[in-house]
Amino acid sequence: MARTPSQPDRLPLRRNATGTSILIMTLALLAIGAVMVPSAVASLKVVDAHWWAQVSNRHIVFAVAAAVVLLTFWRLDYRWLAAKSFRLPLAGAMPTFALALLLISVGLGVLVLFVGHKVGDYARWLRVPVGGVELSVQPSEFIKLSLIVFLAAWLAHPATKPRSGWTFLSAAMVTGACVGVIVTQDFGTAAVVGLSAAVTMILAGVPWYYLGAFIPPAAGVFWLLVVHVPYRWSRFEAMMDPWGTYHTKQSLIAILSGGWWGKGLGYGTFKQGYLPERSTDYIFSTLCEELGLFGGALLICLLVTWMFQVRRAALRAPDRFGLALAGGVGFVVAMQSLLHISVNLAVYLPPKGIGLPFVSAGGTSMLIMAAAVALIVSVTSRSRAPGDELSQTGSTAAAIAAKPAE
């Protein structure tokens, strides 16, 4: 079994090429969002509102706050998330702090069902008045990260047996509870949470074939909440005919109208009431209209390079906890990016509102994602201690898999 080094060596950032590149690329994505969101919401109308009520002002404030979180939190040792634990029969060692974090997140998710701010028929935000302004908090973003942290810290603990059926059943029940809190209000986010939890379990040592147990309940939920809900099922029908759906049609026209080099930053026309959710769900279309297909291709290259560096961070993690944590967080960002760009390009995915990480407007999402990336950089900044089973030179995912947890 891979053990956690008690005194891991700290790598200075100048010797940590992987961590440095992840930091720089994440800051670059935040900078792109800080430019594109104000451009996307720019209107010919004169807006007379409180400065906090303007999307561009809020986004810049949250982008700066996210950069501060990123540049500060990476210095913390990610292992303190699993430093203290208590034993439970059959389930192994429960990480105290990670469990508390998850319980608080789920509690906020339950609270939003009763007192949350509704948009249409769905409640997804908590409105918190602070200093004369209202802050919108999205509990599903907290659940998304805290579930990955909890599963990674718990299943990778030396006293836990991730290959045990009882352990997997417990993990499945926890995941089901988290997904259940979200799924009735936001099916897309619930799907991302469930898939990221499954990936984290595999990286933490759970046999992949155990996850087949998720298929029947997932199919049942899909049947009840998608097939039998006209609003959601219409999105799957729209997937087969993208030009027949207003949102997707406007997205494609905006992208194509930008040509190779775009109309110029700030000169987009589809944001003037034609392209819906132009600063969130369709920010990629706005970017392509103003910066062209060349600008969109550069953004995709930046995201792919970011994912490659996170993959490297996970494979070189000093312990199984670091592997599961970095891999789980990286999967969330990769999947959300893929979903967002695919929906904007109408690549046979239902038009679901998924923001582009670090670029789309959204305060809670940016802050949580920045904290998550800081954890990945923290993983890269710790070297394996001498004598650790996973500290052999050239260790890869295959070497890790060759030493499964008991």
Image: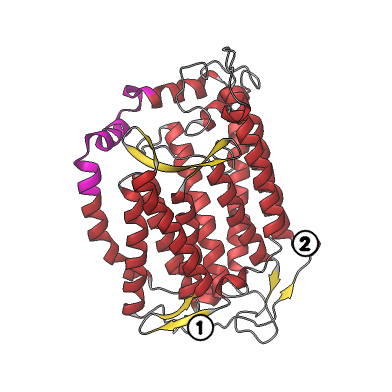
Q: Is residue 238 magenta?
A: yes
Secondary structure beneath label 2: helix
- Give the label on residue 13, or none: 2
Which quadrant of the figure contains the C terminus? bottom left
Query: At label 2, which amino acid type do we have?
Result: Leu
Magenta-colored span: 222-246
Report the residue at 53% width, 32% height from top.
284
Residue for badge 1: 158
For the residue carrying disc 2, how many other residues have a C-alpha within 10 Å: few (<14), some (14-19), or many (20+)?
Answer: some
Q: Is residue 294 visible?
A: no
Residue 135's quadrant in the figure? top right
Q: In the figure, 211 relative to 93: above or below?
A: above
The colour style of the image is: secondary structure
Report the residue at 30% width, 30% height from top.
238
Residue 131 % position (x, y): 61, 39
Q: Which residue is at the far bottom?
A: 387
Residue 85 % position (x, y): 51, 79
Q: Is residue 110 visible?
A: yes
Query: Viewer-proximal residue, 392 or 317?
Result: 317
Q: Which residue is at the far right?
A: 14
> What is the count of numbered marks?
2
Q: In the figure, 205 relative to 62: above or below?
A: below
Residue 179's quadrant in the figure? bottom left
